[in-house]
Amino acid sequence: MARIGKDNDALRRLDLAGRPVAVRFRRNRRARRLIVRVDPGIDGLSVTLPPGAGQGEGLDLIRRRQSWVLGCLDAVAPRVPFAAGAHVPFLGHDHLIRHEQGRGVPVLRALNIITVTGRVEHLARRLNDWFRQQARDEITPRIGRKAAVLGPTGRRAGRVSIRDTRSRWGSYSVNGGFSFSWRLVLAPEFVLDYVVAHEVAHMKVMNHGAEFWAVVAGLTDDVQGARDWLKLHGDAIHRYG
Ligand SMILES: [Zn+2]
């Protein structure tokens, strides 16, 4: 890894768990150690290099503390209200929100564009209703399919509520009711699928022991990947709307 000149501020882009992060290196003769900070000005990180340390050491430190770094970046990330021109993920894919005057289908998604029709003051509420409905449409059939894979458990799959819960992505209660965060429809499909699998698995095993995780693994493709994704990006999907 090349060292940078002592008078240079070098800006680089780094891929952290699939997220592009800007990193600015600053050399400081008086610094005693490498320091990594969130730099809101570049929506990324600033790394202070003490004498003798190169960019490579800075990058190593960032990668070693990846989940901490991503958590800090999410904490300072700006909120994204539902408004024309905003970018919002849908099943993990970036979508542009467009507004259109007039009557017609209230919300239409095509080619990474979500068009909301009607009066602009109703846009945020319409989009919110639409995301909740999309979440329901994605989640409900998955519950049915996964419950069928489980076979008879003595517990039933009852009603599904879609909520805006901050503390949990989903829940299952012994009376058969499921509850899910609508925000799961912002996450990639394998993440939503895992959360549904997790709650359906509770129809068979109520605790989180080894038997439970074996059941979950039989109901979805990438348990560890989904759990890691939620740990890294769970906070970020609470920024929308
Ligand atoms: Zn659980």
Image (spheres, helix red, strand yellow):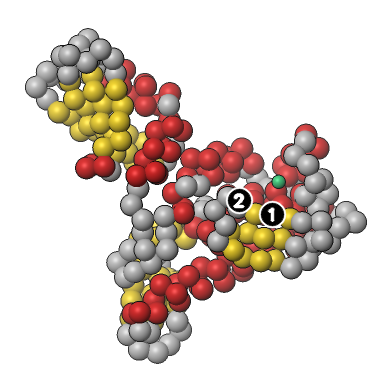
Front residue (pair 186, 73): 73
Front residue (pair 218, 230): 230
Q: Residue at x 81, y 53 (%)?
A: 203
Decide if ligand 1 comes within 8 Å of the CB at mark 1.
Answer: yes
Q: Eyeballing the image, is 177 above or below 194? A: below
Q: Residue at x 62, y 42 (%)?
A: 222
Question: Splitting the image into 4 quarters, where does residue 181 fall?
Answer: bottom right
Give me the disc on residue 168.
Answer: 2
Residue 33: x %, y % from top left:
28, 15
Question: Splitting the image into 4 quarters, where does residue 10 fall?
Answer: top left
Q: Is residue 228 left or right of residue 77?
A: right
Q: Secondary structure at mark 2?
A: loop
The residue type indicated by label 2 comes to Arg
Q: Residue at x 37, y 26 (%)?
A: 62
The residue type indicated by label 1 comes to Ser
Residue 134: x %, y % from top left:
55, 68
Q: Secondary structure at mark 1?
A: strand
Image quadrant where one finds the C terminus: bottom left
Q: Is residue 195 visible?
A: yes
